[in-house]
Image: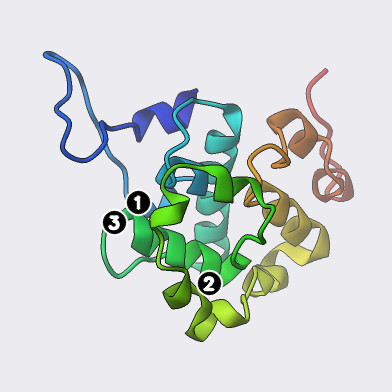
C-alpha cells in the first residue's frame, strides 16, 4: 500500500536487493503490527501513519516519540499511550511480540495509558473518536479510509465524501 510502502525496509541484518530504493521514515509513524513482524501489507498501515500525522498536527508533537530508534522502544511509546494489548489481542500473535520486555511495558506510564485526550481541545469529541479509530492497536479493527470519510467528524463539519 501507499504510505506504508515508503517506510518499508528490510529486517535488521538483511540487505536490500540490488537497485532497490529504500526509504525509512521516522519510526514514530510505523504501525505496531509492522514493528512486531507482520509480514504483509494492508491499508491499515497507511491509516495508522495518517493517524500519526493528524495527531502530530493536532498536538504539535509526535504522538509516539521513542527515545531509541528501535522497534521495541517504539512499541513502548505506543503502549504507553494506547495501553498494553490484553492476553487475547491480535498483536500478541505476531512473531516479535514475545521478544518484548513486558515487565518494562507494565512499569511507569504504561500502567495507565494516557490515550489521545490531548487531541480533544483541537479535534473535539468526534475528531478524537476518529483519531482513536485510526490508531486502533487491532489492525483488523482499525478504520478504513472509506469508513473514515463517512465518520461523524466530517459530517459535523458539513463535509461529504465524494460520490
Q: Nearer the viewer, mark 3 or mark 1?
A: 3
User: In this image, 111 relative to 22: left or right?
Assistant: right
Q: For marks 3 and 2, give the CA distance.
A: 16 Å
Q: Quadrant of residue 83?
A: bottom right
Q: Is residue 45 above or below residue 110?
A: above
The residue beneath circle 2 is: 80
In the rendered structure, the answer to whether residue 100 lies left or right of residue 142 reads left
Q: Tags 3 and 1 in contact by the CB under 8 Å rule? A: yes
Position of residue 46 measured from the top left corner of the image (x, y, whole percent) = 53, 35
Left or right: 70 with respect to 108? left
Residue 27: give its label: 1
Of label 3 and label 1, which has the lower sequence position?
Answer: 1
Residue shown at 73%/61% (left/top)? 128
How far from the left and from the top, in percent, is residue 58? 58, 63
Answer few, some or many: residues within 10 Å of disc 2's Cα (few below 14, many 20 plus, some between 14 and 19). many
Question: Residue at 41% of width from left, 61% of height from top?
Answer: 100
Is residue 62 visible to the viewer in this orientation of the structure?
no
Amino acid at each position: 500500500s501507499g504510505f506504508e510502502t515508503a517506510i518499508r525496509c528490510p529486517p535488521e541484518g538483511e540487505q536490500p536487493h540490488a537497485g532497490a530504493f529504500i526509504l525509512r521514515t521516522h519510526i514514530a509513524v510505523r504501525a505496531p503490527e509492522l514493528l512486531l513482524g507482520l509480514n504483509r501489507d494492508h491499508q491499515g498501515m497507511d491509516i495508522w501513519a495518517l493517524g500519526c500525522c493528524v495527531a502530530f498536527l493536532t498536538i504539535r508533537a509526535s504522538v509516539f516519540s521513542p527515545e531509541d530508534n528501535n522497534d521495541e522502544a517504539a512499541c513502548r511509546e505506543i503502549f504507553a499511550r494506547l495501553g498494553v494489548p490484553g492476553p487475547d489481542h491480535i498483536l500478541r500473535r505476531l512473531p516479535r511480540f514475545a521478544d518484548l520486555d513486558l515487565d518494562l511495558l507494565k512499569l511507569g506510564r504504561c500502567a495507565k495509558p494516557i490515550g489521545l485526550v490531548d487531541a480533544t481541545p483541537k479535534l473535539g469529541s468526534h475528531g478524537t473518536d476518529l483519531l482513536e479509530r485510526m490508531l486502533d492497536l487491532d489492525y483488523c479493527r482499525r478504520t478504513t479510509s472509506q469508513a473514515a470519510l463517512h465518520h461523524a467528524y466530517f459530517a459535523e463539519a458539513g463535509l461529504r465524501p465524494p460520490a
